[in-house]
Amino acid sequence: METVRTRFAPSPTGFMHIGNLRTCLYAYLWAKKHNGTFVLRIEDTDQERYVEGAVDVIYSTLKKAGIEHDEGPDKDKGYGPYIQSERKDIYLKYAKELVEKGGAYYCFCTKERLATLKDENGIGKYDKHCLSLSKEEVERRLAAGEPYVIRQNIPEEGISEYDDMVFGHISVPNKDMEDEILIKTDGMPTYNFANVVDDHLMKINYVIRGVEYLSSTPKYNLMYDAFGWERPHYMHLSPIMKDAQRKLSKRYGDANFEDFIAKGYLAEAIVNYIALLGWAPKSNQEKMTMQEMLEQFDVDGISHSPSIFDEAKMRWLNGEYIKELSIDEFLKYATPYFDASKVAGKYDYRKLAELLIPRTEIFSDIPEKINFLEEFGEYDVEMFENKKMKITKEIALMALKKCEEILPKVENWTNDYLKELLTNTAQEMQIKTGQIFLPLRLAITAAASTPGGATEMADLLGKEETLRRLRFSIELLEKNM
Ligand code: GLU
């Protein structure tokens, strides 16, 4: 088998949409799975969309995502330049060759003439007017410096077909396609032309990209054929949706890799999650390392139906990754969130980390989970009522009073010791352990959910603060029975 060569060809827009990153990942996996080459090409021919620094965003995203390109603008292995704006002369040369071969022609039509071909909705095909110009006339007008474009010459009859590796057989009647522009008046190529020339010259044999190109691909194939070039294999990828109707897009926010990183997701978890958006391994494994994805990636598992982006699932997966972090690794990500919380600089961050590692889905949830350590005051005592645990305000008050009796005497103020003490106390009182632990946890945190149980929270708060809060809560309960 020939060496597999795939490419990721982003336009430098300044952000990396999740859909693009998934395309990138699949192209990378397909190449690496076959010991092939993964090429990065920057598609910046649309100068109006040019964004300063956008290429750096592409590099940094790939790096964080653990996707390493073998070739690209910074790694020229002889197929460069890998930036389209630096390849202008190449496109023109090939466009002229295509004209020679009959696959394209010069068009001098003015905007005004083109406007007459369209209806009020701007719809109407180009009528091949300039295809009939004689060679001499074309030469003369070119020599006179008349502005021109080069258009693809699509046969008026017949059908164009190919087999997509994901979508199967695709066939488009030639009459449904238009003689689109390949080279614009400014001499720059359109995407339609540049992608064909570049993929051929860069020896890309597997083209993996978004489904929006599925039905344009027959047009591209006509160019491959006209040049006498071998067509690549194609894998088009279904869209990622926000829900059944709406595509996931910048408009609905947070659809970019950088936004998720800023929200407190780990790059590995994002990459793992998006791998599963449109692909399911045979093993049905969900949490996978890049190596595991490489081993299991296959085209049969790629779905052609749209996939729904489920942030709750990505949160869950991120939590699974966080659980595996060491305290030091966790602190590297969590410290900025600790520093931004009400707890900043107080409390032992390592102790907080230990409690939070098994309980954090995304880092940005941290402040809300720990702010209770600093925030404590009036709250609604109905919180103590818990049918399932058979706790009433009366039972809670009784349990808390017992705590107030025994806790001041404790010298060894640690989670382990407190846990044992309260467990024994519950036994002596002939109540369930939950009937003492839950009221105590609520009484000293006033929070419905905390990163740990009563004794862990008591340990964290320290003896003095625990007793102060306990007294406050007993008084509050007594006032509100
Ligand atoms: N530059 C195109 C895009 O960003 C890439 C399409 C392709 O992969 O061929 O949509």
Image (spheres, rainbow, N blue to C red):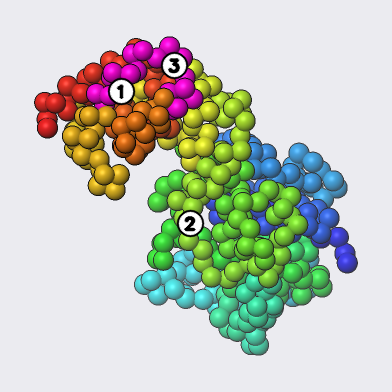
- Residue 15 in view: no
Camera-side residue of 371 and 26: 371
The first of marks 2 and 3 along the sequence is 2
Q: Quadrant of residue 127?
A: bottom right
Which element is circle 2 on?
A: loop
Please rate how many residues cluster around mark 3, counting C-alpha atoms within 10 Å: few if below 14, some from 14 to 19, many from 20: some
**Which residues make up the magenta segment?**
400-420
At mark 1, the secondary structure is helix
Which residue position holds label 2?
A: 309
- Screen quadrant of the C terminus: top left
Drawn side of residue 187 relative to residue 353, left or right: right
Estimate the spatial distance between the alpha carbons at disc 2 and disc 1, rounded to whole Å.
Answer: 48 Å
Decide if residue 347 is on the left or right side of residue 91.
Answer: left
Amino acid at pointer 1: Cys
Q: Is residue 108 left or right of residue 36?
A: left
Observer-nearest residue: 232 or 38? 38
**Label 3 belongs to which residue?**
413
Q: Give the x, y percent position of residue 341.
A: 40, 23
Secondary structure mostly taken by the magenta-highlighted segment of the chain: helix
CA gap between label 2 and label 3 equals 46 Å
Picture quarter with the N terminus: bottom right
Query: Residue 411: within the magenta?
Result: yes
Identity of the residue drawn at 44% across and 73% down: 123
Tag shown at residue 403: 1
The one of 152 and 311 positioned closer to us in this rendering: 311
